[in-house]
Amino acid sequence: MNKQAQENYKIWKKQALSDPDLRQEMNEIRDNEEAINDRFYRDLEFGTGGLRGILGVGTNRMNIYTVAKATRGYAKYLKNREPSPSVAIAYDSRINSQIFARVAAEVFADCGVKVHIWPELMPTPSLSFAVRYLRTSGGIVITASHNPSKYNGYKVYGPDGCQITTEAAAEIQKSIESMDVFRDLSVYPYEKGLADGMISIIPEECFHKYIDAVSAQSLCGEDTDKNVRIVYTPLNGAGLKCVTTCLQKNGFSNIEIVKSQEHPDGHFPTCPYPNPEIREALEEGLKTARGKDADLLIATDPDCDRVGIAVRDEKDFRLLTGNEVGLLLLDYICKRRVELGTMPKNPVCIKTIVTSDLAFRIAADYGVEVKEVLTGFKFIGEQIGFLEEKGEEERYIFGFEESYGYLTGGYVRDKDAVDGSLMIAEMFACYRARGESLIEALDALYQKYGYCLNTLHSYEFDGESGFDKMQSIMKNFRLDAPKALGGSEVISVSDYETKICTDADGKTEEIDLPKSNVLKYITKDNTSLVVRPSGTEPKLKLYVSVRAKDKTSAEKHTNELVKEIEERLK
């Protein structure tokens, strides 16, 4: 057990913990040095994504004490910036989400920060909308997005409705570090706050304005078959009310809900990993879709900011990747805007550096500029803000990332699965009315622009030793960069930590993006590899993009390349 873990554990042992589950866990681990070390060797890391961690006792866990400490630190940051700050709060269906939201509200109020809280679980993008609509100083969402049920988290937003920047996160972290997890624990009673106005419930009007804002993104015309049969699953999360309300408001009434995943349940009994990116999470939905002879399956993650789909392909359903849906939406949005005469002057699409580069080719055909940003939708939201500052927000037509995040308008500054669900449904319906399936539309894109296979490979590194291992791997990739990948010469290495791109001749160019612990390699045959530690999970992620004549060739090349990299990881 390291020294920090010993010190933290001793402090927590002396406390009369108010949560009986935490008291029980402290008792259970008292003779387990490894378990104690994992829970106490560090404070849960705070970054641009806020906090995210396993539920439980300790400084390296999500519990009422770490939530209260983070809240007090964020409140201090807000009070230093303005005399009478306010925040909005949302929460999803995860274990303790509502409890953590209430604790945060009480701490904010105790610090003199006025609170506006949603009265029921709501999607993450609705928090971004509420911050902008209510003009609060910031906001938080209690969620761990698509992580397994043992996780929860704490996302932090600025006054623009965008997740906080790296600079803001560093300032908030300093404020958090100045707090004592137990000494600074006073709260403002929730009921008292409701009575005197320090805590107020976000009105129903805000919900309807949010749905109206999403609906305004519609590109539907008379040539759309809205009678398509849709199966929808919120994966036991927060999407049910918003997604169904929005779809029905826009004429999609033939909707079947997956019964086993309809109601909020933070244990996610039918999909232990509630991520619409993986097939296992969609199995219940696929069963319902087959049984109801549906045309389209839509699934949103627990906080309803990511959306995955499956479409009927001959006799069964085919799952489309985040890149594939993003490319289809980009082409559809451009095509429809041209048809409807609503394409703005100098239109802009924004994507992350790990998202399919086929976007450049599609966008070029429509005269659309593509901006690239670091991984994380907050950087897309930031770019929308830059356009708004210049009075050019109407130029933005679409933003997307390979991890199933999409946004078609500036009404929020985060990915929005309510918007994504609506746009996917109407794209599907529009093509259906023209006698074309999404599979056929996708194949047409590949035929026109070339086949590209993008895959994500994740490797878990738990605990203190795992964290050190990831740092060692990233250091190795920097000091001993691969000269070739899959038999093709590496012609470009981009190090986003040093912000330097180096070509095969040793020539360098500065990268005009914020610093980030990310490496990207590009080879002569247009293969690319991105290596980065996850900012929210103990995982190292590899993003592989392979160009090939067809899917079979691309899969073969990808498998060979991944085996090569895995040998290096060993």
Image (cartoon, rainbow, N blue to C red):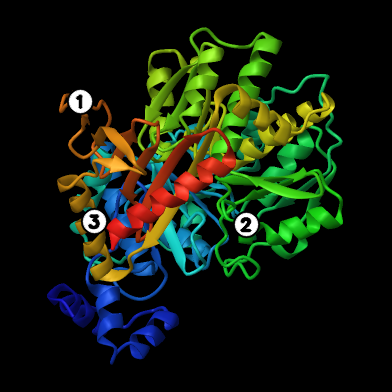
User: Percent position (x, y) of residue 104?
Assistant: 41, 58
User: Percent position (x, y) of residue 424?
Assistant: 68, 35
Q: Quadrant of residue 510?
A: top left
Q: Nearer the viewer, residue 65 or 1?
A: 1
Question: Badge 2 is on which residue?
Answer: 279
Residue at the spot 50% in from the left edge and 20% down from the top edge: 361
User: Percent position (x, y) of residue 407?
Assistant: 55, 32
Q: Quadrant of residue 458?
A: bottom left
Question: Badge 1 is on which residue?
Answer: 510
**Left or right: where does residue 231 sit relative to residue 179?**
right
**Left or right: where does residue 512 sit relative to residue 98?**
left
Residue type marked 3: Ile
Instruction: Please tell me how crowded label 1 is: few (under 14), some (14-19), or many (20+) other residues with Cα within 10 Å.
Output: few
Q: Quadrant of residue 250?
A: top right
Residue type marked 1: Glu
Residue at the spot 78% in from the left edge and 19% down from the top edge: 221
**Left or right: where does residue 3 sit relative to residue 224?**
left
Residue at the spot 79% in from the left edge and 29% down from the top edge: 436
Residue at the spot 15% in from the left edge and 47% down from the top edge: 479
Question: Badge 3 is on which residue?
Answer: 473
Point out the tag, 2 or 1, that comes first from the N-terminus.
Answer: 2
Residue type marked 2: Arg
Point out the tag, 3 or 2, that comes first from the N-terminus.
Answer: 2
Quadrant of the drawing holding the C terminus:
bottom left
Q: Nearer the viewer, residue 549 or 318?
A: 549
Instruction: Please tell me how crowded label 2 is: few (under 14), some (14-19), or many (20+) other residues with Cα within 10 Å.
Output: some
For marks 3 and 2, give the CA distance. Answer: 29 Å
Point out the tag, 3 or 1, that comes first from the N-terminus.
Answer: 3
